[in-house]
Amino acid sequence: MRHEPITFRPADPADATAVAGIWRTGWRDGHLGHVPEELVVARTPETFAARAAERVGDTEVAVVDGDLAGFVMVVGDEVEQLYVATSHRGTGVAAALLTHAEHLVRRHGHPRAWLAVATGNARARRFYERRGWTDEGPFDYPAQGPDGPIPVPCHRYVKDLASPDPSPR
């Protein structure tokens, strides 16, 4: 378990390179073998770099002892992306990021959050279930490819956030 405190802050443009690296590594770990090959081919280091730079405004980072340990992207009521640096996996950063994402969704006025998990990503699905998220069933998530959306077999997970937010503001 972690010993250093985790702090959260909005990402800034200087974080984009680190976010892109964490994102690509984590995405490959959770998605290879579970998404269409067309999407795997489209997800190059360059596309992760471009997407991380474009999404700075939607990104919050977790910092541990000065190191960018992970990030989350929240848009509306959707927790779109949540990834942890390999060196910080198993330390509680993922759970802290998910709790932080829930607070962000709640602060934006949404009583319920949702996220998509690739159907074959059993590790992520177990993680979300342990954190109180409910599997509402399969659906095709429209991941953006170079020529338009690519349907990805996923499960929609939801969590009721209607109870008061216990986090300090």
Image: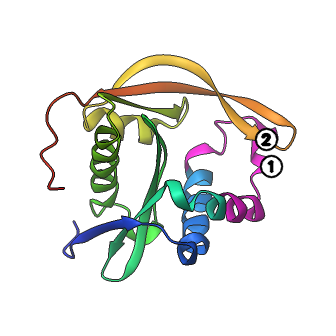
Residue 153's spot in the image, x, y percent?
A: 63, 26
Q: Quadrant of residue 87?
A: bottom left
Residue 56 inside the magenta-drawn segment: no
CB atoms at circles 1 and 2 under 8 Å apart?
Answer: yes
Residue 21's spot in the image, x, y percent?
A: 60, 68
* Neighbour tally class for label 2: few under 14, some 14-19, many 20 plus, Cα within 10 Å: some
Vertical comparison of 72 with 13: above or below? above
Residue found at x 73% / y 64%: 45
Residue found at x 51% / y 53%: 58
Q: Main secondary structure of the magenta part?
A: helix
Type of amino acid at the residue the image marks with label 2: Gly
Q: Label 2 belongs to which residue? A: 145
Q: Is residue 77 left or right of residue 142?
A: left
Residue 47 inside the magenta-drawn segment: yes
Q: Quadrant of residue 55?
A: bottom right
Q: Quadrant of residue 136?
A: top left
Residue 102's spot in the image, x, y percent?
A: 30, 42
Instruction: Decide which of 128, 47 is in the foreground and name it.
Output: 47
Report the magenta residues as a range: 30-51
Q: Label 1 belongs to which residue? A: 42
Mark nearest the camera among 1 and 2 is 2
